[in-house]
Amino acid sequence: MISGASLFVNPAIAAADPAVAAQPDARDGGPIGGGELSFTTDSAALHPDTVVSTACQFCNSNCRLKVGIRAGRVISVSGDPDDPVQAGNFCVKASMMPELAYSPLRLTTPLRRVSGTKGSKDSKFEPISWDQALDLIADRLLQLRDSGQVKSIANRTTGRLPRGTGSLVARLFALLGSPNNTDVGPVCNDAGGNALAATFGLGNFTNGYGVDAATGREDLGAAKYFLFLGTNQAETHPVTFDYLLRSRAKTKAKLVVVDPRRTPTGAAADTWVAPKPHTDFALVLGMLQHIIARNLHDKAFVRRWVLGFAELRDHVKDYTPDWAAGVTGVPAATIRQLAEDYATAKPAAIFCNAGISHQLGAFDTYRVLTFLAAVTGNIGVPGGGCNFMHNTWPGDLRLPELTVTTPPLEQALPVGPDYFAESILTGRPYPLKAVITEGNPLISSANTNKVREAFKKLDFYVYTGLFMEEAAYYADVILPVTSGLELDGVYMRRDDRAIRWQHAAVPRVGQSKPDWEIWIDLAHAFARRDRKKPASYWTDAFPESWKDYSQLWAEFVKHTPAMGGMTQQRMDARAEPLRWPCPTTSHPGVSTLYLDHPSWYEATAALGAPGKRFLTPSGNVEIFTPELDRKLAGAGHRALPVFYTHPEVTGANPTLSYEPGFVTNPVNPQALTHKVKLGVPGSDAVHRDFPLMGMTGRPSVVHFASVTHWTPTGEQLNGIRLVQVHPDTARRFGIGDRDTVVVESPRGKVTGTALFWPAIRPDTIFVPNTFGPAQQVGDQFGDPRYEAANGLVDDAFYDNLSGQQAYKCFACRISKA
């Protein structure tokens, strides 16, 4: 199989080898960690009593797992061979799911701080009941509400949440009256969705994996050209990437990977292109100019469906491949070849992930990528599209309308949960007093040292999670949550909108609860403690029956447009997931958004846009309209983006500055933002002391966020932070391969182990993130307790539209420890 397949390990005998797949054990699986020989089928001890269909929740492939249960315990894990995309495969992380469920380090009861400085490992907590914990939280939040400080209450959700929890949080915050219910998008991938919505009308991955049931045609597998920018799918989406490789073996599609370092994805490519970090914007502008100048655009599609092509042609005339070469370090001839190959291959698919999202100009870069697809006619066609990974449910999961009048909401804090720290420390634009998180901001937030200081000063903090992570030591109340194997519900292949039903495989550990149940119970604690509102104000909005996820999901299906066909019964009966939108139980679901086909128009009618192909105000692709231009100008941007980049990219490129004061965010109008001035002359002064450019990213296929660092397998396989550095660069700084090194930026420093990697730009180093000082599982292997890599990143530079933090470039230096 293609090289990407080497990433797959199958401790439960997945169906990678047809000879093995034919064995009876291929479905039931062998013991976790088993090899290709397995004699479990007729074993009284090891044959499962039941096999539960559930999900791996360690990455956005969201694979179905067949979990074998014997005597109430997990004894096997295998993939689903009946799903043609998954094809029985899963990656190394799947076997870590039981390790989470059975970890002796799990939080099992609510805890309350009793002593110790916030953040100190000497902090002491005592067990309390759920009612005590939730009453304590309700009392504190109601006190803030009743003293006129309700907007000082904030919540930050995370990608690990069961689907629909965010809707419950939003409902509670609406009843409470706080505008500051934020999600994880600015840390992950909001910018791509924002750009897709601006150009095409929906903020979602445009195409799907597998056969489109509406047309009977292969979708992404039909692509003749794959352009991957800033996405290492082999390590971040391994199962769906393997599907693309299998399809490519049949179609002979060309794969081009754009990344400053060669990853396993780049190793599988026909062409690997290595621009400077944070310069993809310039590369795509150069491609776009060449396509238009050479008349390689799809004239018929542009004439019928695209608004603003003439304005775009004039706008990009000076963004030539030669100009782009000077910014990116990629030869102009390579940029011309990329442009010509992409424009002439039909269909051609663009894929992006955090490598684009985590840039200062994320929204504008994604917008220019949508232009690239639009002018070449690669939108609304199978095998094409703008497949920008997004991390949230497509659209709102809606509940019945509230029957009470809720308080008016003031404007939310500036976009991005990392602005929490600024608010706590400076009181601008107003102070936060109470924060609840479902993630770990002490690992995920930029400028970690600043975030640490903020959470020390935060009046009241509630941490929800599986383990005593870094953030838990700052908490006043700690709430234990269930792991993915302990709950019923839906899970989503988050890129192509593919949703499935999952079943709990094992009982809940201790007193842990799923997140949706916690928020329902918190609403009932408000009912007990509120002296200004009747209990029914809260309880009517949060029926106890919703703690049964089947009933909660039925409410979502009933009240959410274009989701009427996604019933539990229908999804539970399918080996393949069902894609949103899916308006009725007879509808096949939509694979290719914007496809000129009756199934799409049936879906758009359910979305409130009957007859429209594109869900923009005009019903067309909107590259430029006067209305969009005016809307974005309020925050300093334009419908036709001008080039700028991070000030710590070498070369003194045009950058930006932030104006004082706040304006309404045109992309997220519920929130504030700083207006920016674009095209500000850059300076190379920082590189006198910090001559290199650094990037952060996932350590390997083994890890997902920080949670896998709490598994023995995760730490055994990848418990050392391996800093990738070009051998010539290392020798220049007196560093040997596998030396302990210090990476330092103007914000802070972290340690790691040098890994000589010739396939990285000599001016760039790669620092794996997700490591943190609380991760004690690695102690058994002698692993260091690392500081968070995001301590190197400057939170002052962020995309003022989406809130994305600029993790993909920081000036730095490296030295031997």
Image (tube, rainbow, N blue to C red):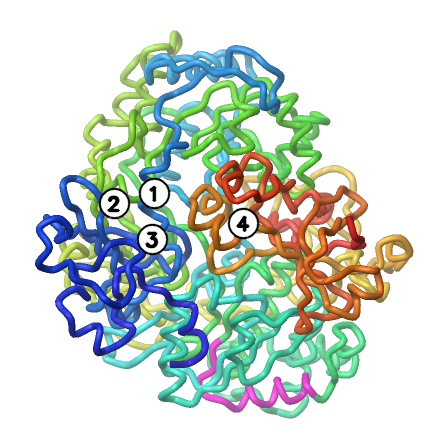
Q: Which residue is mark 1?
A: 162
Q: Which residue is mark 2?
A: 489
Residue 336 magenta-highlighted: yes
Q: Which type of secondary structure does the marked residue at label 3 adopt?
A: helix
The residue at 49%/32% (across/down) is 437
The secondary structure that most of the magenta stretch takes on is helix
Q: CA distance from mark 2 to mark 1?
A: 7 Å
Residue 371's x, y, as percent?
57, 73
Q: CA distance from mark 3 to mark 1?
A: 20 Å
Q: CA distance from mark 3 to mark 4?
A: 17 Å
The reply to whether residue 415 is visible in this rendering is no
Q: Which type of secondary structure does the marked residue at label 1 adopt?
A: loop
Which stretch did the figure color magenta?
Answer: 334-349
Q: Earlier in the sequence, mark 2 or mark 3?
A: 3
Q: Earlier in the sequence, mark 3 or mark 1?
A: 3
Of circles 4 and 2, which is in front? 4
Q: Which residue is mark 4?
A: 719
Work out which residue is located at the far top of the displayed protein and give it: 531
Quarter assignment of residue 117? top right
Q: Which residue is mark 3?
A: 95
Under mark 4, the amino acid is: Gly
> Are discs 2 and 1 less than 8 Å apart at CB?
yes
Q: Along the horizontal axis of the image, is 670 left or right of 488?
A: right
> Are discs 3 and 1 less than 8 Å apart at CB?
no
The residue at 32%/63% (across/down) is 10
Please tell me whether residue 147 is drawn above or below residue 780 in the rendered image.
above
Q: Earlier in the sequence, mark 1 or mark 4?
A: 1
Residue 617's x, y, as percent?
47, 61
